[in-house]
Image: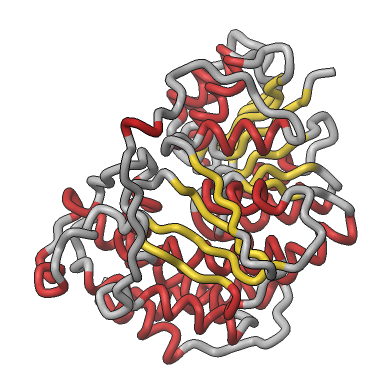
Amino acid sequence: MKQRLAILGSTGSIGVQTLDIVRENPDFFEVRVLTANSNWQRLAAQAREFDADTAVIADKRYYTRLRDALEDTDVKVYAGEEAVAQVAAGGDTDVAVNALVGYAGLAPTVAALGAGKKLALANKESLVVGGEYVMRLAAEKRAPILPIDSEHSAIFQCLAGEQSPVRRLIITCSGGALRDLKREELAGVTAEQALRHPQWEMGAKITIDSSTLVNKGFEVIEAHWLFGTPAEKISVVLHPQSIVHSMVEFEDGAIKAQLGTPDMRMPISLALMYPRRANRPGERFDFLKHPQLTFAEVDRVKYPALDIAYDCLRRRGTAACTMNGANEVAVAAFLGGRCAWLDIVRAIEHALNRASFAAAPTLADYAAADGEARRLAAEFLAL
């Protein structure tokens, strides 16, 4: 029986690659729901190609264009962020692939888990912002969460079949587009420089987050919630080749690592097909072409965002929600040419130093913290 998919964020990098997996495995999957933020043209083309039942455009300004583009089909068309969450919980799908970017992914994550659906999760912000709430809900509904992030997929694979506690999770870090720049060169970094990732093809927002290591800090928080591992047992190492996707060290000293080429289709296919693996076409990994794999300590002065994320994880409550909200505003400003690269982390620090804090947040508390963080970041950046 085919898995019926709802792909949230189908026009972005992860969504497009998820549809590649569907094309490669037509006997395993049926696309029922597709959503996008504003790219109505690509969404319409995807809905036609995969004969989707429903298409949702989150930005209501593009509803009419999407509806008109699909008027000669049977595709049902809706608009708005509320509609995205509603279709994530819809009864005619088995799996929700959350490939949305940022805080906007939290409500659909909660909706899908609340409906007891399997969640293939690429939206790390769902766990960064509301990890305690999300994981409790998943446990109550017995709804599985399968990670799509390459690092968390690697850890998931290393833990499969293990029954003993871990000594340490080791998350690898490429260093992003600016890893070869000296600290004194960072003040003049342009968006073009920061978007030029040496290994991975990702969306603009996550590529900038990779350059600041905000993304890596968020991955530490995500790992804590996914695997129940305390902050002091999660470490980050610089690995420029991006071949070892992450590792797990056990109490007997053994270390498991998951290796492979930097291709997101592998963790996507595993999240969809687990416990099976896809028979994927393409070039196989050749160790002879990668004779040297190197590892180094992260420069915590050059990349202060990593320690900020660790601090937010230890504080818990709404701290990480505040960090995320401020970061989203600052990254958008940087991409729009309205602030410097260094201002991204400065805006995060400004927000964290001034924001209110809820130790045991509700969903309403997360929403309030997100809104406050955005206001504080905009204030700092004079937007």
Judge from the rendering whether residue 49 lies leftward or rightward of residue 216; answer left or right. right
Residue 38 placement (x, y as % from top left): 45, 38
User: Please, which residue is most extreme toward the top here?
Assistant: 72
Between 228 and 7, the one lying in front of the other is 228
Figure colour scheme: secondary structure
Please tell me in which quadrant of the rendered image residue 369 appears: bottom right
Q: Across the whole image, how many numbered discs are drawn on residues?
A: 0
- Residue at image x 62%, y 28%? 55
Please tell me in which quadrant of the rendered image residue 358 appears: bottom right
- Residue 326 sits above or below residue 89 on the image: below
Residue 287 placement (x, y as % from top left): 39, 33
Q: Is residue 63 visible?
A: no
- Residue at image x 59%, y 44%? 148
- Quadrant, the N terminus: top right
- Quadrant, the C terminus: bottom left
Between 195 and 251, the one lying in front of the other is 251
Residue 232 placement (x, y as % from top left): 58, 80
- Residue at image x 36%, y 38%? 201
- Residue 68 sits above or below residue 378 on the image: above
Between 96 and 60, the one lying in front of the other is 96
- Residue at image x 14%, y 68%? 182
- Residue 237 sits above or below residue 104 on the image: below
Between 310 and 124, the one lying in front of the other is 310
Residue 153 placement (x, y as % from top left): 60, 47
